[in-house]
Image: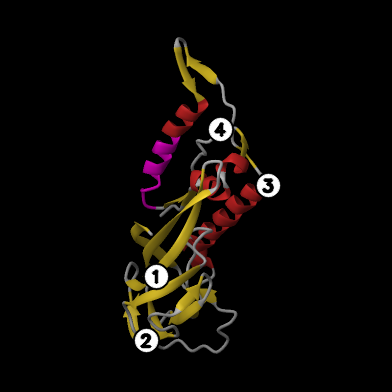
Amino acid sequence: GCELVLFNVSTVIPDEKVDLFRPDDPETTTARAARAKLVVDRLANQPGLVLVDVDRVTAEMGAGTAVVGTASYSEETLHALAEEAMGVILDLEGISQLFASDAMQLIVPRYDRRTTKATLTKWHVTGGVDVEKGDVLFDLRFSDLRASLKNDRRTTNKALKMSVVAGRSGYVDRISAEVGATVTVGTRVGVVTSTREAVWDDLDSAARFPVGIRLEARDDQ
């Protein structure tokens, strides 16, 4: 199926003025952007679409300094948005499949730019088993996700639990991280081959095994 990275919009607009989008119906740009954001958020639940949440990124960066105008952001924020967009593009199944090989690295995926270090809380598979697309492989918990609020950079802490699922069929040749281990995004935690009979030796240059992400919970800490 078609895969598309979808950006939503920032509803933070400094020093805005009321615009007359329709006669006798004053509406701020923020209000109009908020309605557009609701539509985009709903679309993002459709299969094949991945959302890059601009509002969340600007909140993390400190909205008062990250947003410099309507749809205009600081250089640091633009870099963060580009980094997150590239991360989700590389994790799309259609992109990952282009680099698939007989032996593939099972990698801790990136959910967003905040999720850099996690605890591996559960394995749902063992070495020596076949998996199908959609099978849950392992669970992660990311703690202390910090988000800046408004202009004063006050922060809240969040914990996020997610499951990593197979993006295609394969054979789990081995797993290399134990339950309870601290892992970082990009860490190799196992090897998946295309078939049980696949032979490999040069793993460092092997492609990533395509995976998906299933969010389980968000908790206030």
Distance between mark 3 and mark 1 Cα atoms:
32 Å
Mark 2 lies on residue: 127
C-alpha distance separating marks 2 and 1: 18 Å
Q: Is residue 219 left or right of residue 70?
A: left
Secondary structure beneath disc 4? Answer: loop
Name the quadrant of the C terminus: bottom left
Residue bounds of the magenta highlight: 36-47
Residue name at image x 58 percent, y 50 percent: 81
Q: Residues within 10 Å of mark 1 (few under 14, many from 20)?
A: many
State the predominant SS element of the stretch in magenta: helix
| Circle 2 residues within 10 Å: few <14, some 14–19, many ≥20 | some
Q: Secondary structure at mark 3?
A: helix
**First reached walking from the N terminus: tag 3 or tag 2:** 3
Q: Which residue is mark 4?
A: 13
Q: Residue at x 49, y 42 (%)?
A: 8
5 or 143, which lies in front?
Answer: 143
Task: Give the image location of residue 50, x and y in percent.
Answer: 45, 52
Q: Are marks 4 and 3 in contact (CB under 8 Å)?
A: no
> Which sits earlier in the primary sequence, circle 4 or circle 2?
4
Q: Give the amino acid at mark 2.
A: Gly
Is residue 40 or residue 76 the one in the foreground? Answer: 76
